[in-house]
Image (tube, grey):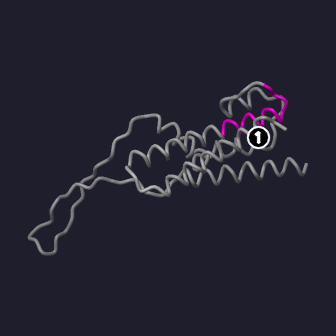
């Protein structure tokens, strides 16, 4: 049994724990953001671990850090690798969105403010207000965890059937 299988499973479990903790807490925004960001980094770790799991299955014993590394160095590109490559090439896929979010969270951000006209039916004229756009409370990391777990489970199951 590959050492990467257990490591991948461990990372997925840790992501699940952080996201469950985030859902239960009604704490400061910084704490909730920290749990979300930590979960996203662990999710990325799980993804890279799974790439190493695939590399080992293809008899490549050196660590890989990206899908490009995996495809460039493995002696055999498997169907599992091609499926991940297809998801990565699709700019609208969940995998591309997840990897983009990981890269973006390493950069400073600021809240965006837009100006909107609001109509006051009891006043003489429309007033101009500033509205700060807030992030949705739904965790994209939860959705990505489910999708990555489903992909890994399906690919592992297919390997066992072969």
| Residue holding disc 1 | 5
- Residue 52 falls inside the magenta stretch: yes
- Expressed as whole percent of the image width and height from the top left, the position of residue 104 reads 47, 38
Q: Residue furthest bottom?
A: 122
Q: Quadrant of the N terminus?
A: top right
Query: Which residues, given as a range, are shown in magenta?
Result: 47-61
Q: Is residue 116 above or below residue 46?
A: below
64 displayed left or right of 26: right
Q: Residue at x 12, y 75 (%)?
A: 122
State the image coordinates of residue 68 (x, y, percent, origin top left). Answer: 68, 31
141 in magenta:
no
Of 117 and 38, nearer the camera is 38
Query: Of 46 and 9, which appears nearest the observer?
Result: 9
Residue beneath the point at 59% across and 44% down: 96
x, y percent for residue 50: 72, 39
In the depicted view, which residue is nearer to us: 155 or 90?
A: 155
Above or below residue 120? Residue 151 is above
Point 60% across, 46% down: residue? 15
Disc 1 crowd, CA 10 A, few/some/many (<14, 14-19, 20+): some
Q: Position of residue 144 (x, y in %)?
A: 60, 51
Vertical order, 147 against 11 (above or below): below
> Outermost residue, top direction?
62
Return the residue found at the far right: 162
- Label 1 element class: helix
User: Farthest residue toward the left?
Assistant: 124
Residue positioned 54% across, 51% down in the render = 19
Rendered view: 126 above or below 77: below
Whether residue 47 sits left or right of residue 73 in the image: it is left
């Amino acid at each position: 049994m590959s050492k990467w299988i257990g490591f991948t499973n461990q990372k997925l479990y840790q992501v699940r724990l952080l996201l469950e903790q985030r859902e239960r807490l009604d704490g400061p925004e910084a704490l909730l953001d920290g749990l979300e960001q930590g979960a996203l980094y662990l999710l990325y770790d799980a993804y890279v671990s799974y790439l190493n799991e695939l590399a080992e299955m293809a008899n490549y014993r050196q660590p890989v850090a990206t899908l490009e590394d995996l495809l460039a160095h493995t002696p055999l590109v498997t169907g599992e690798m091609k499926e991940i490559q297809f998801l990565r090439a699709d700019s609208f896929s969940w995998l591309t969105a997840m990897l983009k979010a990981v890269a973006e969270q390493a950069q400073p951000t600021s809240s965006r403010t837009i100006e909107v006209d609001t109509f006051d039916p009891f006043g003489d004229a429309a007033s101009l207000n500033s509205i700060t756009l807030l992030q949705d409370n739904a965790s994209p990391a939860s959705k990505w965890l489910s999708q990555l777990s489903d992909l890994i489970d399906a690919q592992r199951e297919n390997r066992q059937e072969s």
